[in-house]
Image (cartoon, rainbow, N blue to C red):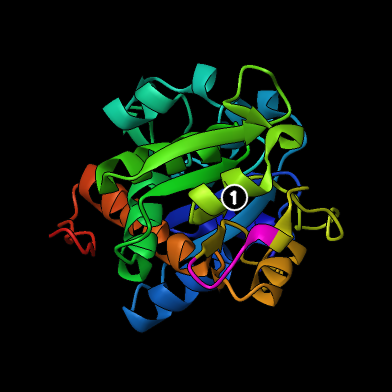
Amino acid sequence: MNLSSAENIRSLFAVIGYPIEHSFSPSFFNEKFLREGLNNFRYEKFEIKEISTLPALIRKYPNLRGLNVTSPWKEKIIPFLDDLSPEAAEIKAVNTVCITRDGDTPVLTGYNTDIGGFRDALFPMLKSHHKSALIFGSGGAARAVCMGLEMLGIEHKIVGRSRECDFCYSDVSPRIIEENTILINATPMGMAPMLEKYPEIPYHALGNKHLCYDLIYNPEQTLFLRKCKAQGATIANGRQMLINQALRSWNIWMSSNGDEPKPAPSAFH
């Protein structure tokens, strides 16, 4: 279906970002709509190069009920929103927008479902020796990971390019790797067009007690994950996190638009 025909759909949802060729969300949600008999629901990709074009997009599609937000707009979308959930306000990053309407006026509320999505994806893999983590990246995705780890009671440090982070990449020694048995890539390194990029750390210090998680899910194994696996570490990509956060987005959209919400699946319920 082309974007012009999206105007004829009763309930439209979409992911926005740039670039978003890799996005799993349209197939996930459109298959969900098909399974549930929601024949007049549709999910699209809206690739926007400038976040300033968002208001025009909202006006163009009055049937638009919800958005997922991906890189690079998770932080820059906030000034265009009318309200934020407490979690999104705290970490200053939004990956889900619910659109309701007061007459003809759209009301946009931002949420962050990455927090719970990550927490519930990581929890089943944790062992007793997984007590502290290194997070590569300092953007909105990394802050969501920080909050998820805090919910799990796991200490964490941020590794980035700025001296405002806990460590710069050049600071990460073999000893630091050995002391932190969870490594999390929350950067775009490893995703197109940066397929050959990876956090530059002493991978030889990893062992079979390490759990290495990459928020990227396409490709299935980034160079970061391949390097970790070669040292005997347990690895996982971000696909389960994506599914978890997508279901939370769906529950928010349905609840906010007057439909009966379903409980978000969680290891903590």
Residue 90 in the image: x percent, y percent? 36, 23
**Magenta span: helix, strand or loop, mainly?**
loop
Residues drawn in magenta: 205-209
Q: Amino acid at mark 1?
A: Ile
Question: At x 77% / y 65%, what residue is drawn?
Answer: 223
Question: At x 40% / y 73%, what residue is drawn?
Answer: 33
Residue for badge 1? 177
The quarter in which the C terminus is drawn is: bottom left
Rendered position, 95 above or below 3: above
Rendered position, 108 above or below 22: above
Dividing the picture into quadrants, the one containing residue 24 is: bottom right
In this rendering, the count of numbered labels is 1
Residue 65 in the image: x percent, y percent? 41, 46
Q: Nearer the viewer, residue 124 or 111?
A: 124
The secondary structure type at the circle numbered 1 is helix
Judge the density around disc 1: few (<14), some (14-19), many (≥20) Cα neighbours within 10 Å.
many
Rendered position, 132 above or below 242: above
Residue 147 in the image: x percent, y percent? 36, 37
Question: At x 45% / y 23%, what residue is drawn?
Answer: 81
Residue 91 in the image: x percent, y percent? 42, 27
Q: Nearer the viewer, residue 181 or 66?
A: 181
Q: Nearer the viewer, residue 11 or 163?
A: 163
The quarter in which the N terminus is drawn is: bottom right
Q: Is residue 2 left or right of residue 240?
A: right
Q: Is residue 109 magenta?
A: no
Q: Nearer the viewer, residue 255 or 186?
A: 186
Rendered position, 209 above or below 168: below
Q: Is residue 206 magenta?
A: yes
